[in-house]
Image (cartoon, grey):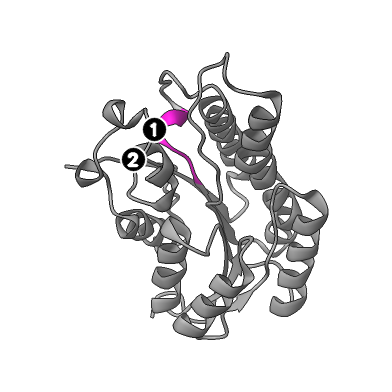
Amino acid sequence: MRLAGRSALVTGASRGIGADVARALAAEGARVALVARTAPALQALASEIGLGAFAAPADLADAAQLHRATDVVTATLGGAPDIVVNNAGVFALASIVDTSEAMFRDAVQTNLVAPFMMVHAFLAAMRERGHGHIVTLGSIADRAVFPGNAAYAPAKHGVRALHEVLRLELRGTGVRATLISPGPVDTELWDAHLAGPDAATLPPRESMLAPSAVAAAVLYAVTQPGAVNVDELRLSRS
């Protein structure tokens, strides 16, 4: 149980990558705070993984709800979690012309502003105690751009920049930061797109990574010796 006695917060934990990350961390002994919009799914997962796991429901695009969730996590754990996994995100496919201002704002708010706010909520306490780990879920779109990624790619490029600033500022503090950038992952985020007119231009599910593969990468990063920082992992289907 490599994470026994440690705590973790996982956003977007109700399904897909986030749920598998929560399961992987709990399987190694971590107490996991589960954050997402859907309370029943979080509560079911908390019951499944045990070890004191608990739900802190919030729509991370809503600043007030995000602050309430971080307050619940801090109060329940008695301080900042040892590990924060910023996984929650939204994925919309549309050209620049077809991307509304609301779509763009939603992508940036959820994929970039919310991870910043999660880091901001806990980083000072992590630095003060001299340990902690911030894991950011990026994407192949944080370093490459594709047609139809008018909102998603800018947000993911931003989150990569956030990670790189964080990594520079944390050197020598005992707090670690890792960016994990997978290619397409077989989750529910693809359902509507693969059933729509863009299906022929998208990767088939059988060529995608499994969510458990991303969870394994997160676990690898957070279980390295304290003097080792995994700066970045890029994942693709072999």
Where is mark 1, residue-wise? 140
Residue 159 image-quadrant placement? top right
Vertical comparison of 181 with 126: above or below: above
Q: Secondary structure at mark 2?
A: loop
Residue 35 image-quadrant placement? bottom right
> Badges 2 and 1: C-beta atoms under 8 Å apart?
yes
In the rendered image, the quadrant that contains the N terminus is bottom left
Vertical comparison of 234 with 53: above or below: above
Task: Look at the image and say whether residue 41 sits in the magenta stretch.
Answer: no
Disc 1 marks a residue whose amino acid type is: Ile
Q: Is residue 35 visible?
A: yes
State the residue lying farthest toward the right: 64
Q: CA distance from mark 2 to mark 1?
A: 8 Å
* Residue 102 appears left or right of 215: right
Residue at x 77% of width, y 76% of height: 75
Give, as a single range, the part of the protein colored magenta.
137-142
Label 2 packing within 10 angstroms: few (<14), some (14-19), many (20+):
many
Residue 62 position in % (x across, y down) = 76, 50
Residue 56 position in % (x across, y down) = 68, 70
Pointer 2 or 1: first along the chain: 1
Number of the front mark, 2 or 1: 2
Disc 2 marks a residue whose amino acid type is: Pro
Vertical comparison of 94 with 235: above or below: above
Q: Is residue 28 visible?
A: no
